Image: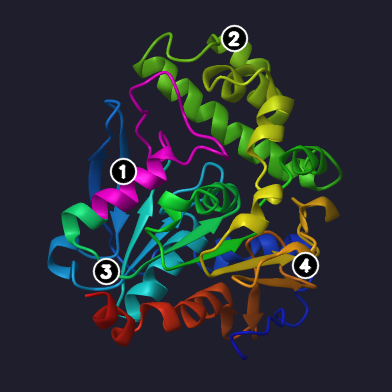
Amino acid sequence: MQSSTFRPLRGADNPHVQTLLPRLIRRRARLQPVWQQLDLPDGDFVDLAWSEAPQGACHKPRVVLFHGLEGSFHSPYAHGLLQACRQQGWLAVIMHFRGCSGRPNRLNRIYHSGETDDGSYLLRWMRDTLGDVPTAAIGISLGGNMLACLLAKWEEARLLCAAAIVSAPFHLDACSRRIEQGFSRIYQRYLVGQLKQNARRKLARYPGSLPIIPAQLQRIKGLREFDDAITARIHGFQDAADYYHQCSALALLPTIRTPTLIIHAQDDPFMTPEVIPNISHLPDTIEYQLTAHGGHVGFVGGTLLKPEMWLEQRIPDWFTRFLSADTAEAIA
């Protein structure tokens, strides 16, 4: 299969099959990550999962991955892409959003779709600590919307030579309504369950760190309810609608100047037509690819005997022109 073209695995073009298949194909990570705690300027921390020890690989081009809602290194796309980048000879790292590594973060805040400060700090810290080499970033789902917001800020964007964004909910309000419909409610139930589990863990470790008590948390059923009760309130938004309005990245795409690959699947069960940008409004720096199939961060091709995770080919192939040895030498 050509890396630039996605063809779903035969008999598996259903969007829900595509969305769920990676959990069967990538059940176990193919590498053992190197874990590191990165302390943040405000006294909190994020956990990093590296493809190898960074101190011995600081000369290599770098790729940073920002995961989706309640994702982690253990998400199939995350450790799969980490391994794919390592095979290219790059140093890769997953930045876990606050509270997503299995350890509750310290402060009275968590993370959200428009919070770029931690990602920006990581990029600067890597440059200052490990040296200045070509660096690219991958944003998946919520992490993709966040990365688009970061790329729209010129000072932060200058830290990256390229980016790839996959299955990003660029219109948060529309996506929050879509996940409340039909079979997609199964995904909402799972995600809300994960959010509540992390919130319970945080409240047990740091009582009063969230504007809710366990009994109220237990009654939350939907993603919008969670964002109304917790995400919006602790991050200074009026409510979930205000949060969605202020942090949706769709309107920011025309301002992006960093070379960026954006991938959406037309059948994504988390999305609606509102997330699809007007191609005529996009700058030349953005390569937009809309596939007919793929589900949400699925994109499983190949055959039943040899399934292929297309993103693990497409993204490294696209990054090669920016992270090649010649590019690294030019920057050095």
Q: Rounded to the nearest whole Å, what is the CA distance between mark 4 and mark 1?
A: 36 Å
Q: Which residue is mark 2?
A: 215
Q: Is residue 100 magenta?
A: yes
| Residue 327, percent from left and from top | 33, 81
Give the crowd class for mark 1: few <14, some 14-19, many >=20 residues within 10 Å.
Answer: many
Q: Which residue is label 1 attached to?
A: 47
Amino acid at the residue labelled 1: Asp
Disc ID at residue 279: 4
**Which quadrant of the view contains residue 101?**
top left
Give the class, few, some or many, for how many residues have Cα within 10 Å of label 2's Cα (few <14, many ≥20): few
How far from the left and from the top, in percent, is residue 201?
A: 42, 24
State which tag comes first along the sequence, 3 or 1. Answer: 1
Q: Point out the frontmost of discs 4 and 1.
A: 4
Distance CA(mark 2)–CA(mark 3): 49 Å
> What's the residue type where badge 3 is placed?
Val
Crowd band around label 3 with a 10 angstrom C-alpha radius: few (<14), some (14–19), many (20+): many
Q: Residue at x 41, y 78 (%)?
A: 322
Which residue is disc 3 drawn over?
A: 133
The mark that comes first in sequence, 4 or 1, is: 1
